[in-house]
Amino acid sequence: MRGGLDVTMAGMNLSLGVRRALAVGVAVWSALSVAFAQAPQAPDGRRGFGVHTPVNDVLSLVRSNAEPERAFMAELDGLTSEIKVLVALARHSYEQAHYFDLLQARDERSVDLLHARFAELDADPLPVLQAGGPMARALASMLLDTRFRVRAQVLGGCEAELGELERGLRVLRAATDGFVLLSQAQSSNITARVDLAAAVLRAVRNDLRALRESSGGSELDPAAVDRLLELARSSEGEGVRRAGVVRQRESALRMQQLMASALFSTRLRPQLAPTIAWRDDLLREARDLAAQAERALPEADASAPPDPQLAALSKSERIRRAGALARQAAEFDPLADDAVWIVAHAAEFQFGLLESRPWYDRYLALRRIRSHDHRSYQERKLTARESEALEAVQRGLVPGDPRMRGL
């Protein structure tokens, strides 16, 4: 009886323990669900930094060791490598199809260059097609290869988005492990652009996965390629040959549009259009101001005819002018490395290391250099600007250095 009572009590305790565990699990899941619902989102609905997140909260997320934040940062970091792997797979398929025969022997055999060369010839392919040879066959194959056409469309602008993501993350991390200082406006600018780039790149990644060739190889019909080449080299007049090639190209374009309509990036683009336009306007303003700042620097006279108005100013006045213009540029684009360097250079001249070091360190981060990690610069030949920035940031780390002006 005692044993039976023990078993019964154990069963009751077990049941109670399970109920408690389930209750705790429900509570935790509810809390996580609320937290996830409240977490900032990127334009594609995935987790993001958020445009209005306070700068201190952004930096806390970047340095956090909590699993959700670590997973979020790892996913952003992984986008670049995932896309590079998918591009490498596409490159391998191009090699197998002899598509790189379209390039000159001296050209780099890169996917970007191949896509750019195809875009040039696609508008008027007849001269290359009728010339015959490996180049003509490569072009004819690409003209009819729907997957190739769509992949080139998907990868258009991808390098710029990768640069946006990588530069933004480098600066955010440098604000947690270095001397970089970010205002709320600069932080919001960066996080909005990182979220935008991440959304675009996630769509690109998904599209590239969908466009991967099947294990059976290319779906392109070699007989169709032969017919196109024969058409281009037929004995008919040029007008007839051109019209025939145009018909084949238009058919290929319709297939491209049909396949592209199902892509993640195609469906996402209208939603992103206002944010992309906002970013383009910012970058355009920043480029104009940065160019003015470059011309204002005294050393600019060595490479271009001096502006009479600038030539009338003293060296110190020109540096101050350049710094003011560059600071405006950096407000529009906190990731513009040349503008950031000019701000640092002018601040060093005017105020010393206390003002210049955060800007020099941001410039180094944008150039993939960390002053506390010699591996980031020991094997590379530094430019004059990189050397100046690195010397300035490291100078402040030497106790008693007499050049620590402003400290």
Image: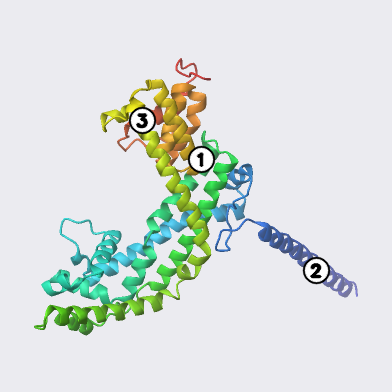
Along the line of sight, the residue nearer the viewer: 268 or 109: 268
Residue 368 visible within the image: no
Name the residue at 20% across, 82% down. Answer: 244
Q: Which mark is residue 19?
A: 2
Q: CA distance from mark 2 to mark 3?
A: 64 Å
Q: Amino acid at mark 1?
A: Glu
Along the line of sight, the residue nearer the viewer: 279 or 266: 279
Q: x%, y% of residue 44?
A: 55, 63
Callout 2: SS: helix
Contact between marks 3 and 1 (CB within 8 A): the answer is no
Q: Is residue 72 above or below residue 228?
A: above
Q: Earlier in the sequence, mark 2 or mark 3?
A: 2
Q: x%, y% of residue 248?
A: 25, 81
Contact between marks 2 and 1 (CB within 8 A): the answer is no
**Circle 2 or circle 3, nearest the eye:** 3
Which residue bears the numbered disc 3?
Answer: 387
Which residue bears the numbered disc 1?
Answer: 331
**Circle 2 or circle 1, nearest the eye:** 1
Along the line of sight, the residue nearer the viewer: 288 or 116: 288
295 to the left or right of 12: left
Q: Earlier in the sequence, mark 3 or mark 1?
A: 1
Q: Is residue 206 above or below residue 281?
A: below
Q: Earlier in the sequence, mark 2 or mark 1?
A: 2
124 to the left or right of 390: left
